[in-house]
Amino acid sequence: MRTSNTFGIHFVLRENRGKNGLSAIYMRIVVNKSRSEVALKRQVAASDWSEAKGMAKPKNDELRKLNTHLEQLRGMMAGHYQELQLQKKVITAEILKNMFAGVKDTEHTLHNIVKYHNTNMIGVLAKGTLKNYDTTADYLEEFVRHAYRRSDIYLSELDYSFITKLEYFLRQRIPDDHQKKLENNGLMKHLERFHKIIRLAVKLGWLDKDPFAMFQLKFEKTQRGYLTIAELNKLENKKFTIERIAYVRDLFVFSCYTGLAYIDVMELTEDNIVQGIDHNQWIKTTREKTRIPVNVPLLPQAVKIIERYRRHPKAVAAGSLLPNISNQKLNSYLKEVADLCDINKTLTYHVARHTFATAVTLSNGVPIETVSKMLGHTTIRTTQIYAKVVERKVSDDMNALRDKLASVPNAQANSKSNRKINLKKAS
């Protein structure tokens, strides 16, 4: 926290705020770049005021008493400022104004609400989601240091301008390390998480109104990457001599036929393999991200991979169904897999989940309600995103319609012919 602040108290006139030809006196509080003014309920003639000194011209006893009063106010505000400094608290012009007005300092800052939210969400949100909130918190702290030259900011200082400045800062921010610059949707996800924290502050009564009220999150529509059946078959049939590459390919294929996310696959144990209502093997688990139960009948391709690694030393030692591997290594090796299979797409493990939703299930006529259940989506609207990109299904449906329409004229012609024959017989 900064200990050397720029602090000043200035008295100014507001001619349009006075009455009976007099001007209203305002006290201007300045701390660093923050400024706030408060009406003192005192008036003076503009001709009796020294703008350069910010005081009344001591022409008579009344004006001298006014100057004494103003100096006392200056001393009082300096005392408030020193008090905050000694307590090592955040100091702003608005806070000093509140102290002058007798408003009690509630101590609710941006850091307080972020910490409150993230601490109370432990055990409620998935680890990956909590990690994302921690990253959002880091960005907020960095922004406050950059824009306000402070380590924290009071919630009462948050407004629409704060949100827009934060958005601009994140768009222009250049990472110090190997990370990529934030793209639009990634940036919007951070603002979305921040908005959730702000709504919590409003519900707790820590903040009077939501600074996001007039702000609109602008997500760009993106195509969900997935493999076609031809690409998936190419991947499955490729022979690899390197064990780690072969295993990464098998893990990817496993999710292409189960729809499970990386973390859910890594947490599978033998207990998750059960006999389903159809007497076949099913996976029964709970999604780490949403804590929603997921039941997926095992297709032969997935069963084959389970059997291949069931007695793998790493899986046995860890008590897991499949050997564990970090998500970072997995995605790194998948790039090699794509190159070796001549697949001109960026492969990440999540592409396997998209492939299950599109090429494996929806394209083959599995109802969207069923796919939504197996994916563990909280709403079918999420699953509909996949349905929009299944061109093969659209093509099949249109071909069926084309055939149906083509058969209509023939049916009408046959009907007319039959009517003519029947009329001849009747005559």
Image (tube, grey):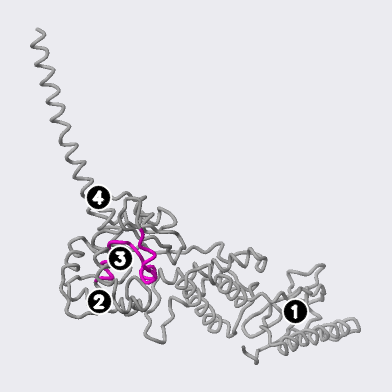
Given the current orientation, which residue lies at the most extreme bottom position? Answer: 4
Measure the C-alpha gap from mark 4 to mark 2: 30 Å
Of circles 2 and 3, the one toward us is 3
Amino acid type, callout 4: Val
Whether residue 306 is in magenta: the answer is no
Of circles 4 and 2, the one toward us is 2
Magenta region: which residues? 250-274
Residue identified by numbered label 3: 255
Amino acid type, callout 3: Ser
Q: Which mark is residue 27?
A: 1
Q: Which mark is residue 394?
A: 4
- The quarter holding residue 354 reads bottom left
- Closer to us: 65 or 389: 389
Q: How many marks?
A: 4
Whether residue 251 is in magenta: the answer is yes
Write the residue at 19% across / 70% down.
Answer: 343
Of circles 1 and 2, the one toward us is 2
Write the residue at 24% across / 65% down.
Answer: 304
Who comes first in sequence, dot 1 or dot 2? 1
Amino acid type, callout 1: Met
